[in-house]
Image (cartoon, helix red, strand yellow):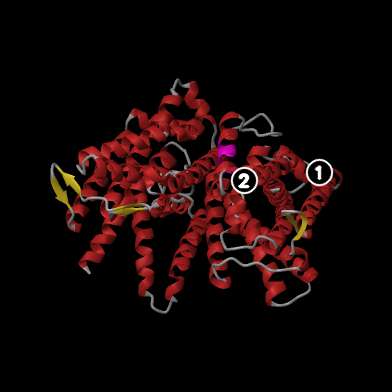
Amino acid sequence: MTAYILNLLVLISVYAILATTLNFIIGYAGIFSLAHAVFFGIGGYTAALVAMNVSPEFFVAVPAAMAAAAVTSLLLALPALRVRGEYFVAASLGLQVLAVTLFSEWKSFTGGIGGVIGIPAVELFGFPVYKPWQFLVMALICLAIIIAITRTLVHTSFGRSLKAIRDSESAALASGKNITVIKTFSVVLSSALAAVAGALYAFYMSFINVESFMLDTSVMVMAMVIIGGTATIVGPLLGAALLMLMPSALTYLTFLPQTEIGSIQQIVYGLAMVLLMIFRPGGIVSSHPGGGK
Amino acid sequence: MLFLQLLANGLQVGAIYALTAAGFSLIFGSTKIFHFAHGATFAIAAYLFHFALAGLGLHWTFAVAVAALSAVVFGVLLDRLMYAPIQRHEGSFFTVFVASFGIGIVVQNLLGSVFGRGFMSVSTPLSNSIEVMPGLYLSPLNGLAVVVAIVCFVALHFFMTHTFIGKGLRALSENPELVRTFGLSPRRLSTYAFALGSLLVVPGAIFTAAGTGINPAVGHHVMLISLAATIVGGIGSLRGAACAGLLIGVAENLAMWKLGTQWSEAITFAILFFFIIFKPSGFFGRATVS
């Protein structure tokens, strides 16, 4: 039972990192990306590759994963600079679909559909971290650092510029904000931090394949941010916890047909998205009651 | 020969995409509602057609009527019960998209639970392929899909240019405020847009159910392609949606010729990605992009 709870907590921390980093661009920059799982995946694959071929040291594998995601995220920054709204959603969707095809076809990097097997345990200064509770502590520390980074940024002049761009790009431009730099930086930062989640996930599972990095994951992370509440700190954490606990909670409802649990879970969160958008568009933890951006 | 075969398949698939994209484009162009659940309408029409024909054993005309009715009812209900309340208090693009996406997830899983998750296809006398030339197999359905698409587009063009409602819808896409000052109700026009747009998925849904087959994710797939076609063609341009749908259908099938099936979706989205970066207004779109 302890092992089961620890496992759940580690996964919640990993997805909370994803939700927090996605919230950084959705909530504060108004960049509505459906390609977050791409950077989760790039982080995971890079960390796995580095751990297996170079060193399983945390401070080698994780920076490598972050760098790889940061570089590829420029592909997402490009449409973010040129278009907004529905056009950007479509572009990020395109990137997500392309990435899934590449993940399943580029066998030397990702192992194809079969995935990467036998990723070694991560080491912290030479000490392997493999016990679940040790791993949980490490994941929670990563989450805390990432929350601290995004929180600090949001409260600086950078964060205010970001919100200014979200609310009116032309007004921000008129007041002399360098939109290109600010937007590119926020996309790169969000993607690089999402890669941390990917690396943690790869080390924890010791096996990864393309199934974890598909459009479904991007949508689920988006749902976590939205259900929890955009542009808040607590919202994404709450959303991640709720969505990760739901499948396990549903298995306790024994009157439900067990083979349909997956579907029921999806129906519940689909409905939650619809009802929240109708009655409380800011999410459960709403930063501006009565209507979010 | 493989080339001709893939070209023929591409034209059929392209015709289906073109119609679905035209429906999405019509709704999005006139009401500015990003109706991602359009794919769900497609899946519902396809499954109910299949159920009426194979499950209940109805005559095909009734099955078509069931599919058409269900699509229109679903589209209009979404407009009235989901989009109208959202638009009343805020209606930002973001909110509408999330709600629409949510409905898509719900419908896909409901269909999976009710009808099963496997591939289903209904065989009709028209589905059987005949070897026209050595190595080239065509079914009457191939040609019929293209003919129906052309008929629908001609009818739609006539409707948009010669009827009061059609003109109203075009006016709504230009300037909703002006429509209101003229004493027309944007809400009512929106209902017409949803009814008509949803109706346009029906031929595609039927041809897919009777041809390549359907599974619960079919709506999602068709929606992704229609979205790509709408943007590549230019949002709000029916002509653009038709050309782009056809282009994507053919490109997808020709990609199989050189690269293999797994690349077909990637090709579509590579096309989309480059259009968004270099020419976001699409083939026939207006120059302004907000």
- Residue range in magenta is B268-273
Determine the CA span between mark 2 and mark 1. 43 Å
Helix, strand or loop at mark 1: helix
Front residue of A173 and B133: B133
> Which chain letter goes with mark 2?
B
**Can I make out residue A49 in this image?**
yes
Question: Residue A50, position in %: x, y?
Answer: 27, 41
Helix, strand or loop at mark 2: helix
User: Mark 2, mark 1: which one is toward the viewer?
Assistant: 2
Amino acid type of disc 1?
Lys
Which residue is at a point 80% across and 46% down the rendered structure image? Answer: B166
The residue to which callout 1 is attached is: B167
The residue to which callout 2 is attached is: B257
Front residue of B11 and B231: B11
Which residue is at a point 76% across and 75% down the rendered structure image? Answer: B58
With A50 as the anchor, is A73 left or right in this view?
A: right
Check the image and name the residue furthest to the front.
B134
With A193 as the anchor, is A276 left or right in this view?
A: right
Question: Residue B231, position in %: x, y?
Answer: 63, 39
Residue B210, located in which quarter of the rendered image?
bottom right
B271 falls in the magenta region: yes
User: What kind of secondary structure does the magenta stretch mostly adopt?
Assistant: helix
Which residue is at a point 32% across and 41% down the rendered structure image? Answer: A46
Front residue of B28 and A235: B28
With B117 as the anchor, is A195 left or right in this view?
A: left
